Amino acid sequence: MKARGVRRLFTPFGIVQWIMVGAVGLALWLAYFPWRWERTKEELRGRFPGVRRLDAADLKDWYQKSEGPKPVIIDIRPRADYDYSRLPGALHMGLADTPEILGFPAKTDASLVIYDAVGADAFPVAASLVQRGYARVQVLEGGIYEWVNGGLPLESPGGATTKVQAGDLRNIGLLKRRHRAP
């Protein structure tokens, strides 16, 4: 009896059914990625409405402009993640630190752009800096994950790279596999 049931799975009709189930599963999986990004961003925007933000393309354009002051890019991920790869020219700052440790007092005219993996830590840090008197603070929305997913350059001690150390695994699904460090 079992042999007949197994044979039914491999009839032309059965094979078409398996292909259809696979296609629907693939379509749902592909649709989940952008939906999750938007849900994450909307949640952070809602929790920190007073924090200014910019996306990866805007930061790249701003940094590459020949005129005007450049933003100071500050990475607040764990030191090991920063040491592995970072945005070009980024400085490292711990979560509990302030930009004073990097030589930027609260009354600075410098534009500070804070980033982490996806923004979950960057938004509260930026809100705290604004409360302490830093007037020109923004968050890189989507963090380093969205930066590298968009094909933008990273640097590492060994030169240019396209890999990011995952760090917190809760949001690893937002980083494309080809950009994950081994």
Image: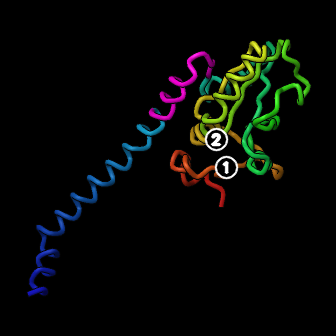
Residue 65 place in picture, x, y as percent: 74, 19
Indicate left or right for 58 with 112 as reference.
left
Q: Which residues are magenta?
A: 39-53
Q: Nearer the viewer, mark 2 or mark 1?
A: 2
Q: Secondary structure at mark 2?
A: loop
Q: Amino acid at mark 2?
A: Ala
Cβ–Cβ under 8 Å for marks 2 and 1:
yes
Mark 1 lies on residue: 164
> Where, by quadrant of the figure, is residue 71 drawn?
top right
Residue 45 within the segment the image draws in magenta: yes
Residue 118 place in picture, x, y as percent: 60, 38
Mark 2 lies on residue: 117
Q: Nearer the viewer, residue 66 or 137?
A: 137
Q: Is residue 23 above or below residue 100?
A: below
Indicate left or right for 147 with 33 as reference.
right
Most frequent secondary structure within the magenta stretch: helix
Q: Which mark is residue 42?
A: none
